[in-house]
Amino acid sequence: MMTAFIKQMKSKLEEEKKRLEQQIAQLVGGEKHKNGPNNIKWTEIGSKDDENAAEVTSYEEKLSLSKNLDKALEEVDAALQKIHDGTYGICSICGNKIPEDRLEAFPAATQHTDCSPA
């Protein structure tokens, strides 16, 4: 049986998952497996050296953002799986309950602040 708090966190996590998936789709231009690593679309600006440098910079920024979005989505998916498994809100390090205020601030938290890396 899910408590009201866990239902609330599940709803927040599902909303966050949709938001992340939308951002990822925008970043890759809705195309999958047609672009470079992580499906990031290469933007052609021109053939001059400064235009090529701008293309590389843009690609690197998108790649970095993509990695961050992918990691956040993995964390959200893991939290949703923990809800499904009945282990949500339990610290993965010490096994104690994670305080609700921490979960409200970061619903995908897997550790309480005492066990979180510095």
Image (cartoon, rainbow, N blue to C red):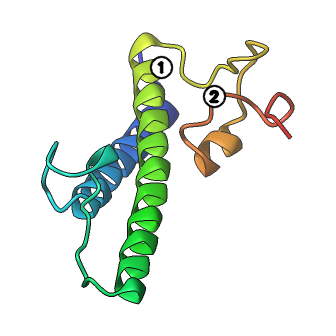
Asked whether the viewer can see residue 75, the reply is yes
Q: Residues within 10 Å of mark 1 (few under 14, many from 20)?
A: some
Report, in whole angstroms, how far the alpha carbon at label 2 lies from the one at label 1: 9 Å
Is any atom of residue 4 visible in this view?
Answer: no
Q: Which sits in the foreground, 73 or 97?
A: 73
Q: Which mark is residue 82?
A: 1
Residue 22 left/right relative to 89: left
Q: Which quadrant, please, contains the C terminus? A: top right
In-image side of 106 versus 15 (left or right): right
Percent x, y of residue 1: 41, 15
Of the residues shown, which amino acid type is indicated by label 1? Answer: Lys
Q: Secondary structure at mark 1?
A: helix
Q: Residues within 10 Å of mark 2 (few under 14, many from 20)?
A: many
Q: Earlier in the sequence, mark 2 or mark 1?
A: 1
Of residue 1 and residue 48, the one placed in the foreground of this image is: 48
Amino acid tagged 2:
Thr
Residue denoted by label 2:
110
| Contact, mark 2 vs mark 1 (Cβ under 8 Å) | yes
Q: Where 4 sits versus 18, above or below? A: above
Residue at x 41%, y 70% (from the top left corner)? 56
| Residue in the picture at 79% in, 33% down | 116
* Residue 87 to residue 22: above or below: above
Give the x, y percent position of residue 115.
82, 28
Residue at 22% x, 56% y is 25
Name the residue rendered at 66%, 38% in the picture.
Answer: 100
